[in-house]
Image: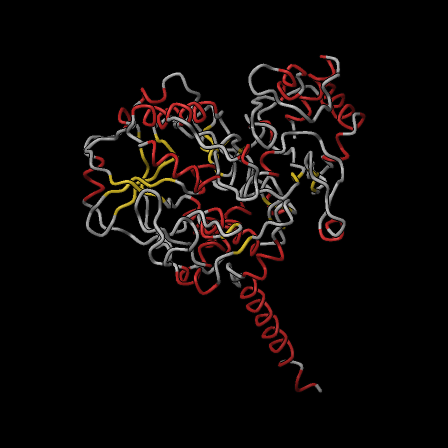
Amino acid sequence: MKKFHHVLPMFCGIIIICIFFSFTANLFTIPKTWDVDALKAHSLPPPDTTAFVDYAPESYYDSIPTHVIYKTFPVYLREYERKGYLDSLRNLKPEIAFDETQFKTQADWIRAGEMVFNWPVAYTVVKDSISSLTAQDFKGQTRKITDDGRYPFNRYVILENGTLLKGSLSCASCHTRVMPDGKVIQGAQGNIFNNSRFAQAVRSGRVPFASIVDGTQKLYFTPWAPSTHQMTPATSDEFADALELASNGVAHRQGGSFERALKIPSLFGVKDLKYLDHTGQMINNGPADLMRYAALNQGADMLTSYNGFVPAGIDGHTKRPGSAEWKHPFGYAAKRYNDAQLFALTQYIYSLKAPRNPERSSKAVLKKGASIFKREGCVTCHTPPLYTNNKLTPANGFEPPVNHFKKYDIFNVSVGTDSTSTLYTRRGTGYYKIPSLRNIWMHDAFFHHGELSTLEDVFNPVRLNRQVRPVKGHPFGLSLSEEDKTALIAFLKSL
């Protein structure tokens, strides 16, 4: 036995090394994104039991061309742009930035995920020699640019032939916030849309009304919704009015409703949440589910058949286009992310951390606010430490089927907020998920429709009966004294 005593430590070391590399390999095993069986199993059905959702077949999805992610460049307002900047970009050669064969560590995958997060999927050709964005476009608006004049909604992309494109509709387009001090926070509730500029283009006729009508049908038509909820704009001005009515922190998302925008959610702590989307559209069991959800929201939902209606379809929206013929509304061939890109995106999102909370209140006020939060029963739905019980609450007018109570986590009490987004849209499930209250100190849109811009608005009973778009439901805290409201709001802003 003695002759083996020198060999044993080396043997154990080899075993440990093998286990380590096996663990590392498993850590970066990339799930398959487009698994139709998993999509069906992890997606909640529409509230109308007669509705039928048919996802694109795996063979079709796999044949869609994938993105090649190049190095991108910031967009500046004209007043901040250095002379000759756009022409200098045209002289550069495209540089591939995402190459999964080079990623060895968790940090590599996170950095790669940030590239995916910022990669635009819609493009317009830049013909000008200077930026078309000017400070005048942002006059009278809250901050949506950085101190050095960058507009984070867009990124420049260079094609092989030197064509310069302005790209938009990246993940960062919605989930980026420019703070009052000019700092950029990725993953936060976004505030960088410039709806008024788009509204001006609509009113001027630069965006043809026919394309608006066609676009709203693609984005919002829901076959099982009654005609009263199949709203499309009657005029260009009506569409422009809807754009300008939308506040910071909201977006008119595809699959939603023309009459109701949706609040842009924060991505901080997504890994801890059981459901994705305001309507709890998808169960969240890990990276594969987040990958599928991202794929849907970056265009695959437009290839889904909803009772025979395919939003991006041909022949009267009855058929999917050829997988290589699918066009983005701006005219470019639409593409999909590959599995490695989507996996990297999940790793980046999981890594996001909220910035240091600047809110400061006395310990006495925070203690009182915490006591009120508990006394008023807020902890029932917004349970610490996540400040959500991770359950679904049925909307007004929806009775959960009996079998749902075995399949989903349901808190069977409706808070009475507007039901449009979950009963009459393609994103609808009949439920709203109970949101987390973490980091709401940096939010300026509240409730799923984002029509309240402050916590003071949330607890003001005037909202229930205001003349323009009254905000019903969630009556909790409305009858508190002003002193108690102040303490409760201070506590909420500290989370």
Count of numbered tags? 0
- State the image quarter where residue 265 is shown: top right
Q: Is residue 77 left or right of residue 170?
A: left
Q: Position of residue 257 (x, y in %)?
A: 52, 35
Relative to the observer, which residue lies in front, 191 or 74?
191
The outermost residue toward the front is: 227
Q: Position of residue 219 (x, y in %)?
A: 45, 40
Identify which residue is drawn at 60% across, 52% down.
Answer: 43
Q: Is residue 2 left or right of residue 248?
A: right
**Residue 190 sits above or below residue 274 on the image:** above
The outermost residue toward the right is: 375
**Residue 273 sits above or below residue 445 on the image:** below
**Residue 224 sits above or below residue 457 on the image:** below
Q: Is residue 78 left or right of residue 403?
A: left
Q: Is residue 407 left or right of residue 284?
A: right
Identify which residue is drawn at 63% across, 75% down.
Answer: 12
Q: Position of residue 388 (x, y in %)?
A: 69, 38
* Display colour scheme: secondary structure
**Residue 250 sits above or below residue 456 on the image:** below
In which quadrant will I find the N terminus? Answer: bottom right
- State the image quarter where residue 200 is shown: top left
Relative to the observer, which residue lies in front, 290 or 269?
290
In which quadrant will I find the C terminus? Answer: top right
Q: Position of residue 254 (x, y in %)?
A: 47, 41
Identify which residue is drawn at 79% across, 29% down.
Answer: 377
Identify which residue is drawn at 38% across, 46% down.
Answer: 119
